[in-house]
Amino acid sequence: MPQDADATSEERPYPSPPKIQVRQTSRQWFTTPQPIRRLFDKFPLRTYPVNELPQRSPQNRERHALWVFTTNTGAQLGAPSFNPGCLKWQAYMIFKGIDFVTISSNNHASPTGALPFLLPASSPKLLGEAALPVPSNRIERWIREKEKNQHAGTSALTKQNSAMSESSDMRYEAYMSLLNYRVRNAYLYSLYLSPPNFASIVLPLYINPSTSNTLTRLALSHQLRSAAETELLKQSPIIDVEAIYRDCDRAMESLSELLGDDEFFFGKGTPELFDASVFAYTHVLLDEDLDWQHTRLRDGLEQYSNLVEHQKRIAEDWFGARGVRKESKSREGLK
């Protein structure tokens, strides 16, 4: 996995404030004491630019690059990320037919401090105008802009149809909240706070590739577990494990009822963002390459055959055999 960028920050000092003759009044104690003013005149405040991209990031890119949690081999094959937050956008971009490559990364290499992020393609002809990275919370908007540009000049009806999304369904937000809270909470507990899963998945995939230093690995382990615990305590004053799993089971049942006999959610003919969001969790839980020791979540998911078939359908039709993305699908779409 790439290390932090070695970029040096250009210091940009603010100009020293001009020396002002302060009138001697009874309210003089509101002014800054002279010793402190002289100190800041000598050492002015400085601002630093945002983190630069890793040095190995190509300056001229003919294809979009999505930086995700994955192995080096997985990045070369375009295999699904083992991180739900990354896999959601990876799958959605594939659904939209966007030609891109995946790059193995970690949060420390991200300009925003979190994965995934997207580096749009740039042309060698546009020197000095390289596209800025797109954080995960802006990827959907970026894709919509690409689609809008692609449909420019088409009929009004075609534009209207292309602009329609599943989010117009009144049920969308309610069911998305099931994923963002109930399913995610159970996933966080199972992965980070269950010692067997932490040892079999988090250590080899998230921590060990980042550093070989034992003390640093211990510190990262503590940070990840503490962050997961803090996130769960935002929902409840205590972490009730059984309640977390029960809520997840109910959420899975609701998702199964929503899907019904359809191939994709909300009766769509092709998978959309909600399908990508569900697949991001179901694939990680059902992935045989991940060594889940505590299988409470997987066992609960396998009770709903249509959700399992939904995961298999997307994995096979959009990522291909052995989790390798089908290039023929992605290269037919947006450049």
Image (tube, rainbow, N blue to C red):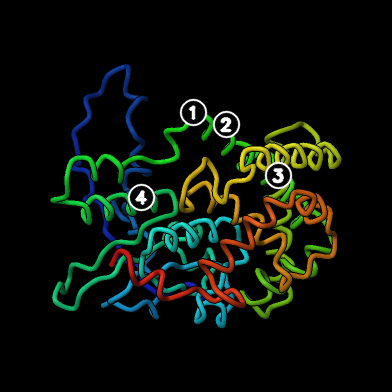
Residue 293 in picture, x, y percent from top left? 84, 65
Q: Residue at coordinates 64% horizontally, 54% vertically from top-left?
A: 281
3 or 1: tag closer to the N-terminus: 1
Q: How far is the residue under mark 4 from the one under mark 2?
A: 56 Å
The quarter of the rendered structure image containing the C terminus is: bottom left
Q: How far is the residue under mark 4 from the one under mark 3?
A: 49 Å
The quarter of the rendered structure image containing the N terminus is: bottom right
Q: Which mark is residue 174?
A: 2
**Label 2 amino acid?**
Ala
Q: Is residue 98 above or below residue 238?
A: below
For label 3, the residue is 185
| Of 72 and 113, the residue lying toward us | 72
Where disc 1 sits, the SS reads: loop
For label 1, the residue is 170
For label 4, the residue is 39
Q: Residue at coordinates 68% horizontally, 35% vertically from top-left?
A: 234
Asked if the residue under mark 3 is in contact with the one under mark 4, i.e. CB atoms within 8 Å, the reply is: no
**Label 1 amino acid?**
Met
Where disc 2 sits, the SS reads: helix
4 or 3: tag closer to the N-terminus: 4
